[in-house]
Image: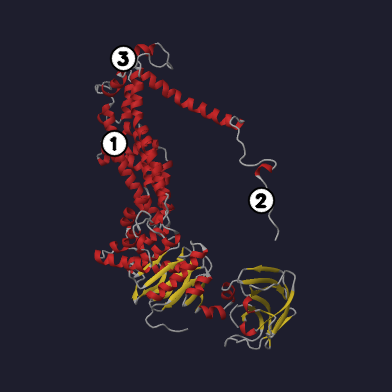
Amino acid sequence: MTVIENPSVSIKNLDLNFGAVKVLKDLNLDIASGEFIVLLGASGCGKSTLLNCIAGLLEVSGGQIHIGGTNVTWAEPSDRGIGMVFQSYALYPQMTVRGNLTFGLKNAKVPKAEIEKRVARAAEILQMEELLDRKPGALSGGQRQRVAIGRALVRDVDVFLFDEPLSNLDAKLRTDLRVELKQLHQQLKNTMIYVTHDQVEALTLADRIAIMKDGLIQQLASPKEIYNRPVNKYVADFIGSPAMNFFEGTVDSGVFTAGNLSIDLKGYEFTPTGKLGGLAWFGIRPENVIVGGDGPVQIDVIAEIVEPMGADTLVWTHVAGAPFRIRMDGTSTVKMGDTFGVSFDPAHASMFDKVSEERL
Amino acid sequence: MTRVSHLTTADAQLQGPKGPKPKRAFSGANLFIYGTLIVMSLYYLLPLWVMIVTSLKDMAEVRMGNIFSPPAEITFQPWVKAWSEACTGINCDGLSRGFWNSVRILIPSVLLSITVASVSGYGLSMWKFKGSEVFFNILLLGAFIPYQIMLYPIVIILRELGLMGSLGGLVLVHMIFGMPINTLLFRNYFSSIPQELFKAARVDGAGFWAIFFKIMLPMSLPIFVVSMIIQVTGIWNDFLFGVVYTKPAIYPMTVQLNNIVNSVQGVKEYNVNMAATLLTGLVPLVIYFISGKLFVRGIAAGAVKG
């Protein structure tokens, strides 16, 4: 793991308990200045809790939070140098857009001229000059979320916190705003911490993704690394849609065997610590399985279910008793019941220990 | 491609039921519903009718005994007498004294109880502290204890505070007894406001009072109207506390009404009694009529989700 010099946000040995339930356990995370970090995980994994702790909206049970080099563990949310965007937008319904943008600044007793300047800048960046005198009720979902981002923007802070900001929007708008968010980050270069359960958002936006489960960070790495070299079976299974295909079997002298399937692991890069024998999981992503092709592993399959999805066609089948998914080209003409040959290269696979589920 | 031909079939050629289902005006269910409604409204409206017509008759006509018939000759004398001439004890200035007493009790009691209840409801829903739920449950328990049990202890407390028999004492009692139900109302209303709004305000640097006044209050007109209706009718109609904790000079209207109607001296003036009763009931009635509209408007205003 790389050590980050002068982290923008630094979380040290953070614990958070709700009564007897330990939500966050001894969590450590350093975030570089200007970095876009995505906290990704299933619901209940503690990702939103962690964000609320960073914002100061939840009191921590143990550990420290540093923002911009200052220990803010006991500081009020407004004194931490953060701006926050919520899933439900959380705009003040009785105030105009301008009122929403200026509320925090007025509380902080920012001079009037300065407020004007910042609102004008935020409105320009987010292209919402004509919305300033409207009430939130008269805005569409996308416009509301833009105002919510604007409210964080005018605070002129170093760190932006996003709590599932796109989850309330419809699919098309979500894609549009996602791109806008990425542009915004490239333009502003603020540190951004973004919570989501949507892996597409995570993979597209993040510089680094932290995958969380049960209050622990499972893997903290770039999207590419997380996708291609997941550190354990949970991460491998969680990331990727359709999910990775798994076979349960044994490894013995460089060969993986599951039922009548036997795979020569030549080309697979074992981790330095991974043991080379015993019970294991073999995982291969559906898009790494090629119809026909001359990969080292050749299998014949029968298409059980065919799901055309436009750009791709997804074929469901079984191999060695385990469900097996193949992602094919959208123009493929495979029909239900067809038999055809597929191949893949173990170099693209991920292997995990049966018991510890750690990468081999 | 198969051609979709049935779409071109003319509407007239369709067989069997089509279009909206016909409704029968005189179905058994309708007769039952409207019959019940009519009987129920008669049940409630008839006494009101009797009160109104009797209050408009003179005593000679009342004695004839036709209580349902409209007055042969309309007179407003009973209303005037009830308002400004009827005697209770040595005072013969009618209900007007009680009316103004009640107003002087009502206004501070309602304002105080709503203020206290809204702030506690806000605190209990948004600023949860360790033991806040226990605290709230204890408060709620207060709503279930019969008033009679607390009557005498409160006499002692008021006496020790030097408030026994004073207007201030009665206002305090109304405020305390209004707290459980109104705190519950406000707490539940504020709980329905998204937590994220509260969090956003905290990130924006607003404290306890700033969030209350600038964010929560403008959003809670409906619940204030509801709470006001409950408090105004409750306090105006109160008899027990008024008679126990005050003295004759500041008796509220309800107590004075009782004293007029139940006075044993002289002839029973039914027309004056009816007029006095109607006068006493007028305030809650007016509140219902005015705030009913406000209530609907308030809900409509609060319905815009941000």
> In the displayed structure, does residue A40 sit left or right of residue B63?
right
Q: Which mark is residue B105?
A: 1
Q: Earlier in the sequence, mark 2 or mark 3?
A: 2
Task: Find numbered disc 1 in the image and state the secondary structure of the residue it sits on.
Answer: helix
Residue at 35% x, 30% y is: B282
Q: Let me know if marks 1 and 2 both belong to one chain.
A: yes
- Mark 3 burial class by Cα count in 10 Å: few <14, some 14-19, many 20+: few
Q: CA distance from mark 3 to mark 1?
A: 31 Å
Closer mark to the observer between disc 2 and disc 3: 2
- The image quarter in which residue B11 lies: top right
Q: CA distance from mark 1 to mark 2?
A: 73 Å
- The image quarter in which residue B264 lies: top left
Residue at 32% x, 54% y is: B214
Q: Which residue is tagged 2?
A: B7
What is the chain identity of the residue bearing mark 3?
B
Q: Which residue is tagged 3?
A: B266
Residue toward you, A33 or A184: A184
Q: Earlier in the sequence, mark 1 or mark 2?
A: 2
Tag 1: amino acid: Ile
Above or below residue B95? Residue A187 is: below
What is the chain identity of the residue bearing mark 2?
B
Q: Let me know if marks 3 and 1 both belong to one chain.
A: yes
- The image quarter in which residue B250 lies: top left
Residue toward you, A230 or B187: A230
Above or below residue A319? Residue A109 is: above
Residue B77 visible from this viewpoint: yes
